[in-house]
Amino acid sequence: MNTQTNIPEDMELVYGFPEALTEVSTHYCPGCTHGVVHRLVAEVIDELGIRGTTIGVAPVGCAVLAYNYFNVDFVEAAHGRAPAMATGLKRVNPDKVVFTYQGDGDLAAIGTAEIIHAATRGELITTVFINNAIYGMTGGQMAPTTLPGMITTSTPTGRDPILAGYPVKMTELLAQIAGSAYITRQMAADVPSILKAKRAIKRAFLTQMHGLGFACVEVLSTCPTNWNMDPWKAMEWVKETLAPAYPLGDYKMTDEVKALEVR
Amino acid sequence: MVKELLKGNVAFAEAALRYGLEAYFGYPITPQSEALEHLSGRMLEEGRVFLQAESELGAINMVYGAACSGVRVMTSTSGPGFSLMEEGLSYIAGSEIPVVVVNMMRGGPGLGNIQPSQGDYFLMTKTAGHGDFRPIVLAPASVQEIIDMMGLAFDLAEKYRTLVLIAGDGAIGQMMESAELPPMQPVRKERPAWAVTGAQDRDMNLITSLYLNPDRLEEVNWRLQAKLAVIRENEVRCKEYETADADLLLVAYGTVGRICLSVMREARAQGLKVGLLRPQTLWPFPEKRLLELAGQVRGMLVVEMSAGQMLEDVERAVRGKTPVQFYGRLGGIVPLVDEVAAALRKLDEETSQEK
Ligand SMILES: Cc1ncc(C[n+]2csc(CCOP(=O)(O)OP(=O)(O)O)c2C)c(N)n1
Ligand code: SF4
């Protein structure tokens, strides 16, 4: 946390701008939770004291410019390949903390092979997976996670599973894999769920730092722009529609991960 | 150092390791799998990184990630795998980081076969990925030469922060020859200043190929082109055999270059003044030298295990100053000395009235 702030002697700093974030305004739309999750990751990096030893891997998607907002070393991957790039980075820097930040198109469509195999290898990386059930960056087309009946710019009459397949549940899939140590689904829809998501992200980073295996935190997120909703309605929609389709909870947590103290 | 009997694939893999290779990521494909197999044991023995990826897409992006940390890293593959790697190669080129990739070319298109070919010449020299870039492409003709070229490849890649490809063919990978390996080098301890290694006590480092602002991207592209111009000026390599008094010139690289050496010697024995130019860099291409020779010889014969890919570069280089003929075999067939000799006689006959 930034301690440069001048505060009176009889007061203590309890909240500030994370050191792991750069002080620029993001390009994210109003009400988009990408920015919220960025902040959670940055707070976790600060709290764990790993700003100088962390390497981030940005995806292709709305978070493609994530490296403009994080004050840590970063690389920009090709669409879906972040887990492979992170693997290369981690294998030659075993003492560093490597994380990927990926959308649902990036992780659950074009990059399915890369994420599954990173998990099978028990790769010591941490993945933050933003599921907004849509392709945000390219203008709201169907994502692999788009719900049946949901209208997108490439399913104008609603996603018909017979034509366009069923939503893919990556967290359930990743939880089946032996190399996975911590696989959880959270949401960023209100203050309690956001605080819970932060603890999960912290546990996922600690999982890596203790060498316990692959960790992935799925965060159900908003895309008010492409959902054609105002920010408030989008948050409500996450709680009322998205979360029932993608049930929250820890899907895999090894005993060692469970034993980690997460404050 | 002593000479040993070495298989091409094992030789280049062991050479890379001895030149300080810190990490190898690959996916099995004939005819280069012995390289991956060799390194699977040796890299671990030496305390270095080896990983068999889930695909060539995985492998090249692992290479990309490791290279962003400024370590010596490589992969090797053959045609179908190289096609998959092209996505990564373009990002690597756009990010200007040093990477070495060996392609032991096999018969194509499609699954083709596993016999030697030179059908990936265009792919490697001209279309190794989307966007405006050129990799340096080295073309070895023997086991010893591919050993030596591994060291050169890493040096060039790091000197220019660029992609270096080695255009081998199945024959180079599979044949056994006596050759000498370099002495063992440890991996480099320090990492370059641009590498991502964690932003401890310094500003953050970023490696990206994304520049949304077109003015900025054009600037980056011009800088890339300026670097390629320096490479084009300084890194052309070729071997010439008996070109000083040559009336006819054979132009061939790799395995075919060796076959053409035999053709040349036989022709010389029969009194025909034949020379051979064997490009060791396919990009940058020895265009200036070929243009000079075009003013000297009656004609040139380009020989390839393809339908005539390098041929286009030779034609471009000589600018119509001399007749250029072609002989090629496809589908994984290696041309025989007699076939090439017949094509050379034809060139001789058709050009002997001229000049
Ligand atoms: C190989 C390739 N194919 C397609 C694209 C175009 N593209 C950019 S972002 C994107 C989808 C991103 O969606 P998602 O991962 O859900 O992230 P979001 O934008 O919703 O955060 C696509 C298809 C690309 N950049 N590269
Ligand atoms: S398009 Fe959607 S995902 Fe992208 S920034 Fe806007 S709200 Fe967020």
Image (spheres, coloured by chain):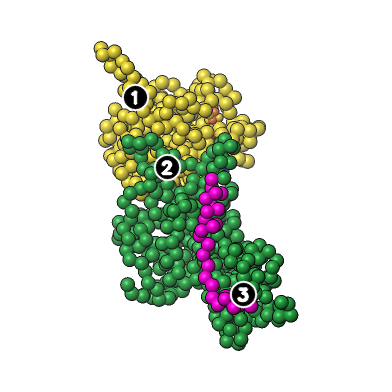
Chain colours: A yellow, B green
Label 3 belongs to which residue?
B249
The chain containing the residue under callout 1 comes to: A
Report x, y in % for residue B66: 40, 49
Relative to B61, A11 lies left or right: left
Residue B28 position within the rendered picture, expressed as x and y whole percent measured from the top left: 46, 61
| Residue B247 sits inside the magenta stretch | yes
Q: Quadrant of residue B274?
A: bottom right
Give the residue type that dot 2 points to: Leu
Q: Secondary structure at mark 1?
A: loop
Marks 2 and 1 belong to one chain: yes
Instruction: Kindly report which numbered mark, 1 or 3, lies closer to the viewer in this rendering.
Output: 3
Q: Which residue is mark 1?
A: A2
Looking at the rendering, the stretch of residues picked out in magenta corresponds to B223-248
Name the residue that disc number 2 marks.
Answer: A174
Residue at 63% x, 33% y: name it: A153
Amino acid type of the residue tagged 1 in the rendering? Asn
On whether ligand 1 comes within 8 Å of the CB at mark 3, the answer is no
